[in-house]
Image: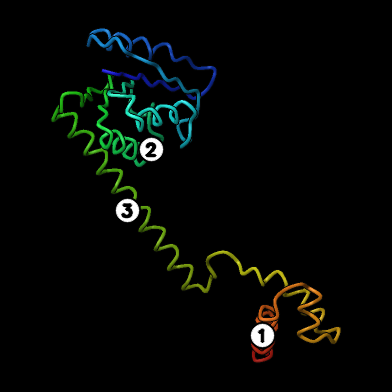
């Protein structure tokens, strides 16, 4: 049984000792001897942490059978992130043990699996709510006439094109001077013309 202990604290001012002592004692009681440790000092909100990245790389290479943590919040930065990690553990046949919360999937423990399934369901619900709010926000913005997405790359040429038009240059000359395609120059000029017509109509 290849067991990896994962511990995390948020700052250098905190210590891993209390987490590690309990988790090590737990591994001893289980008779696990092939135990490695991965330790992170990083904020829990960070998706990428050097230690966690190493742990997941080992999981994907089949180097880990069991991941042991003190609490679930030491592992995932959010419910959604935790659900993602759990799903990857399950894909690679890796059990998860959380010593302080009674979660142990090493022996297909039904109660522990139920807890994990509930967490994953809540995470999926959380993602759905966020998606719904984002879609509602986009719809509301569009109804107010807000232009969404990245601004057109041609927009940055509008001022220069307008100035060159006032100077009497033609389309081909403007295209050469600004080093933009002739078709793009036509589009910018048409945009300026339409804008001028709208302003004139407004008057």
Sooner in the amino-acid sequence: mark 2 or mark 3: 2
Residue 85 location, x and y as percent? Answer: 34, 36
Left/right of residue 7 with respect to residue 100 in the rendered view: right
Q: Which residue is mark 3?
A: 128
Q: Residue furthest left?
A: 110
Instruction: Name the foreground residue: 16 vs 88.
Output: 88
Q: Residue furthest front?
A: 61
Instruction: Name the foreground residue: 108 vs 71.
Output: 108
Q: Alpha-carbon distance for marks 2 and 3?
A: 15 Å
Q: Alpha-carbon distance for marks 2 and 1?
A: 49 Å
Per the image, label 1 sits on a secondary structure element best described as helix
Q: Which residue is mark 2?
A: 78
Per the image, label 2 sits on a secondary structure element best described as loop
Sooner in the amino-acid sequence: mark 2 or mark 1: 2
Res 5 → quadrant: top left
Image disc number at residue 190? 1
Instruction: Name the foreground residue: 56 vs 112.
Output: 56
CB-based contact (under 8 Å), mark 2 and mark 3:
no
Q: Residues within 10 Å of mark 3 (few under 14, many from 20)?
A: few
């Amino acid at each position: 049984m290849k067991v990896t202990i994962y511990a995390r604290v948020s700052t250098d001012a905190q210590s891993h000792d209390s987490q590690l002592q309990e988790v090590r004692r737990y591994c001893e009681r289980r008779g696990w001897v092939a135990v490695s440790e991965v330790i992170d000092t990083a904020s829990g909100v960070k998706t990428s942490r050097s230690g966690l990245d190493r742990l997941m790389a080992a999981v994907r290479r089949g180097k880990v059978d069991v991941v042991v943590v003190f609490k679930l919040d030491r592992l995932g930065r959010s419910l959604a992130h935790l659900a993602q990690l759990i799903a990857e553990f399950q894909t690679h046949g890796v059990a998860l043990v959380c010593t302080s919360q009674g979660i142990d999937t090493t022996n297909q423990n039904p109660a522990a699996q139920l807890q994990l399934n509930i967490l994953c369901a809540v995470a999926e619900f959380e993602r759905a709510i966020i998606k719904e709010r984002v879609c509602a926000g986009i719809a509301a913005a569009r109804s107010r006439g807000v232009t969404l997405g990245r601004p057109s790359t041609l927009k940055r040429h509008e001022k220069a094109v307008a100035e060159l038009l006032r100077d009497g240059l033609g389309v081909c000359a403007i295209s050469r001077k600004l080093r933009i395609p002739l078709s793009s120059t036509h589009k910018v000029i048409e945009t300026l013309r339409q804008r001028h017509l709208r302003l004139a109509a407004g008057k």
